[in-house]
């Protein structure tokens, strides 16, 4: 059985490692703040001192970090993953970064004799814990087939979408709908509410309607009670929107609804609500409608 | 058991009658083009010569017609439903009309001694046939409780949302998300496609993602092959969008994503594609992206 | 010299009459509130008791009223203008109404033996008083040539744009830019202000730049100090925007920037700012940016 | 009299040099393609072999280049302007670049003992030749006062807007209105045209209306006949729009009309029209309206 390594044990990353451990895999992990990973060590994970050490003791490595800078940091340098890789190492990057950056990192991995797949996940902690998280994979098809069984220990489905960087592209192309759907949902709730329908009832109807995507089902109730800790805050959502908008301009694809929703994320930040889950666009629109949303 | 009457046996109306017949109800029906209803007569429905005759032989009546003008036509005049109603008649209007019109018609029904509920459906023919069509009901709560068992023969759930006209308001507030979600979906598919992902693969990923509402699941594949007959064409969708936008202005609720999507429905019509299902906004965006969509 | 009649002596109408009197024309006027017209009587205007009386003592009549209902009211009925018209009467309607309504009223005038032109003005009180108000004229060309000299006593230019209702169409097509330009101007000022440029300086630069239309020159300074009385408030502006959006849908012309700006007018009303000049969209955007605009 | 140096003799830069020569200034100039500057040499300009040589023989230097990369190139390196600067050199950068880049370059100039102002121009070749080009200046106020007389030989007005990078910020905040105004103008023309008004007449009315900014006056006629060579093509316009949108996100100012117009510039490029003047957004909208614009 292949030895697995994982760098980036944040909210999602740590839970993915837990699933891999539960499925019987041997996992070596690294997190900048080692203490945060103690519960995984208790669950059987081996902790490494550096990303390089992770690579040295693994056949297949994973990264799941927050942005381009973090990705470059854990991959490069003396203590980085690349320094520990060798011919045959397979690396899966589960971060959401600019597809061009993903391709650049893939090239660096190839230079070590290894190969890289971009493998972002679509879904939230809840989806993951329910075993319903789906993965998209970009890169070499044969490499994908080798790791597919392991990916199926994470979620029920892993879809191969094409060459280097295309899975992260697909993730970005998916995520733009999250913010747009949330804005449209908010418009509907406020229209109902100002017509005289109770907000609770409007939400109830919408989360059972033809427009109820998993996102709507999870986040719809947030307009009744915003979670204390954001699942995905405005800054993070806007990072993905910007990746989409930049790609749209580069590829000459107009993104009118994405651009519209993105300005409402900016407004959320301008109103001091940027740290909330992006469902807070409801509040932005509510204030524009003269509806009280004091929380 | 209450005798039921149904006026407007179009695509949805006829199938609702079929479900009521299958559940053992006695139904008298009327359609402007009588021949179209023959299959329902074969299935046990009694055909009436006028809406008035429907009302005269029923305790509970339904209407499901395409717009305000049609609703006024079948309700009013010498041969209209109101002319055949009496104290105790319960009328359910399942059409999507301006909430103000719905309230006006409810007043007219009350003048006959009857009572009216607005009871639009959310979903398509497919949802109905799978027994998953949900209903929203506006009007008097006690009247709703009386007819609820019958509504549960149509679909699994009937949600009471409030007073007169509020169910149709809720329907409008729901439907605006249909067009917005379709536009965002199209943006995602085109972004993926111009990045090098096959359109089929992009659709496949999206219809299994966190943004996959029932609408996205049903209509997503339309961007691969547009149906010969529109489920809900651009003109019809735009009628609902306009109801939302008018309500938004009246109630002072800005609807930025609705307004954006609506202009793309106008564009679809401007490009001669108005008769297609509103999923054709994909083609509008594709042409703006220089992507061929010759069908 | 032709005898002139004028119905609707509001802010603009009264000043137009004053210019006609100054140019030596005999004018009979009517206003619902007679007292408001005393200063014009003092300046030589003959006051009439009804619109009908205006028509009876005039060869050429004008209307300038606020909306469709007011226009129908002063034209129709026993005391209306039409009742006093005869073969050869030329009527000029300077109101901004739905082009279809304009055409309908033109038909009613024709039925009296007269003829009608739609002749809305483009500009404000300031433009008028500076003698720079331009007029657009729709209707029969020969009729236009007959009244052109009189129109040139109002402003420096009267442009014939085409048949019945087309001048009011052109007015609507012009006015949509007012709100859009004001929104874009506001975006620019706020961007400058949050960068560290004084608001006064940003306004100063913009009103002297390539984007400084007369509208920008007049209204730009409003973001520094909003006038006590609106020149053209959000409700009025939104009436024109709606005429544009309805026409756009009917003629299948997408109006993306109009639709965007219109939702910000709705927001202004939703935030309780609807009675201000439409330049108040600046405040809407300022609040979304976390900028204080307490006035 | 101060010796002037100018790097970047493109369409605008060369004409500014010509004005400086006409005003009696001694100017040393550099252009990558020396031949293009021959007409200026004929008019009295001294040609230098490198940007460094320009700085060595000048007291006050100017740059006007197309983007950040070009600016860094002419400033830096062995042959760059900075290499030739000394204590007391005043540098004016007239390029439109990211304000952060402008500040970074100002720091580099300061390191040589000199000082820098950002001094972008607002207007086109036509405005310049008519002597109506206005300049905005950012940087140290005392330095501004020293060079102000020279700036007034270029245009009638130079406005000091604040510290380093703020003039280029103000330029970006101005330019966003260019594209938005052009989109709104196009909406108006198409609305008029599909109503039955001749396109020529609609343009004529609009360029004489309250919305007729200099931009509208210059570019309005482009919808009748697009110039062979773009004054400012879609790519260039979109560069400025992106600077605005990035700044908006950074400063938390939503830019809804900018974002909307920007997607239409993307569409212009997607339809293969990106090399045209940005007035080509008219054609994008025309095609969405089913209006022929074959050129």
Image (tube, coloured by chain):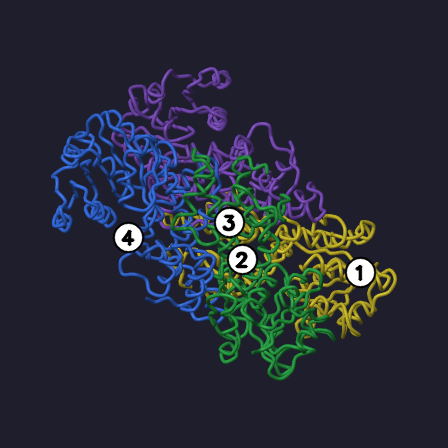
Chain colours: A purple, B yellow, C green, D blue
| Label 2 to label 1: alpha-carbon separation | 45 Å
Residue A160 visible to the viewer: no
Q: Relative to residue A18, is residue A139 drawn left or right?
A: left
Judging from the image, mark 2 belongs to the subunit labelled: C
Residue D96: % across, % down: 32, 41
Are there few (<14), some (14-19), or many (20+) residues within 10 Å of tag 2? Answer: some
| Label 4 to label 2: alpha-carbon separation | 32 Å
Contact check, label 2 and label 3, Cβ < 8 Å: no
Q: From the viewer's perspective, is residue A110 above or below residue C285?
A: above
Q: Quadrant of the C terminus of chain B?
A: bottom left
In this figure, which residue is indicated by the disc labeled 4?
D125
User: Front-most of D176 and B104?
Assistant: D176
In this figure, which residue is indicated by the disc labeled 3?
C219
User: Front-most of D98 and B203?
Assistant: D98
Residue C124 is tagged as 2
Callout 3 and callout 4 share a chain: no
Label 4: state its secondary structure.
Answer: helix
Quadrant for residue D17, please give it.
Answer: top left
Judging from the image, mark 3 belongs to the subunit labelled: C
Contact check, label 4 and label 1, Cβ < 8 Å: no
Callout 2 and callout 3 share a chain: yes
| Label 4 to label 1: alpha-carbon separation | 67 Å
Judging from the image, mark 1 belongs to the subunit labelled: B
**Count of marks overlaid on the render:** 4
In this figure, which residue is indicated by the disc labeled 1?
B107
User: Front-most of B16 and B259?
Assistant: B259
Q: Quadrant of the N terminus of chain B?
A: bottom right
User: Front-most of A230 and D177?
Assistant: D177
Q: Relative to residue B227, is residue D56 drawn left or right?
A: left
| Label 2 to label 3: alpha-carbon separation | 11 Å
Q: Nearer the viewer, mark 4 or mark 1?
A: 4
Residue at (83, 66) in percent of width and height: B85
């Amino acid at each position: 059985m292949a030895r697995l390594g994982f760098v980036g044990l944040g909210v999602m990353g740590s839970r993915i490692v837990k699933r891999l451990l539960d499925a019987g895999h041997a996992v070596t992990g690294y997190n900048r703040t080692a203490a945060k990973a103690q519960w995984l060590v208790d669950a059987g994970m081996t902790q490494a001192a550096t990303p390089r050490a992770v690579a040295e003791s693994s056949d297949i490595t994973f990264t799941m970090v927050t942005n381009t800078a973090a990705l470059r940091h854990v991959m490069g340098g003396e203590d980085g993953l690349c320094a520990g890789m060798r011919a045959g190492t397979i690396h899966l990057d589960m971060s959401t970064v600019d597809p061009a950056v993903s391709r650049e990192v893939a090239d660096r991995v190839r230079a070590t004799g290894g190969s890289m797949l971009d493998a972002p996940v679509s879904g939230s902690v809840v989806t993951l814990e329910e075993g319903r998280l789906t993965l998209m994979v970009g890169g070499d098809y044969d490499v994908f087939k080798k790791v597919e069984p392991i990916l199926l220990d994470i979620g029920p489905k892993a879809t191969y979408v094409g060459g280097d960087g295309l899975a992260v592209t697909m993730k970005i192309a998916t995520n733009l709908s999250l913010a747009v759907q949330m804005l449209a949902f908010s418009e509907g709730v406020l229209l109902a509410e100002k017509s005289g329908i109770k907000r609770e009832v409007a939400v109830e109807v919408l989360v059972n309607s033809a427009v109820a995507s998993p996102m709507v089902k999870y986040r719809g109730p947030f307009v009744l009670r915003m979670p204390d800790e954001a699942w995905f805050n405005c800054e993070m959502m806007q990072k993905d929107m910007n990746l989409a908008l930049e790609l749209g301009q580069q590829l000459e694809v107009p993104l009118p609804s994405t651009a519209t929703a993105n300005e409402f994320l900016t407004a959320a930040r301008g109103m001091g609500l940027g740290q909330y889950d992006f469902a807070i666009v409801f509040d932005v629109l509510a204030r524009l409608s003269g509806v009280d949303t004091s929380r």
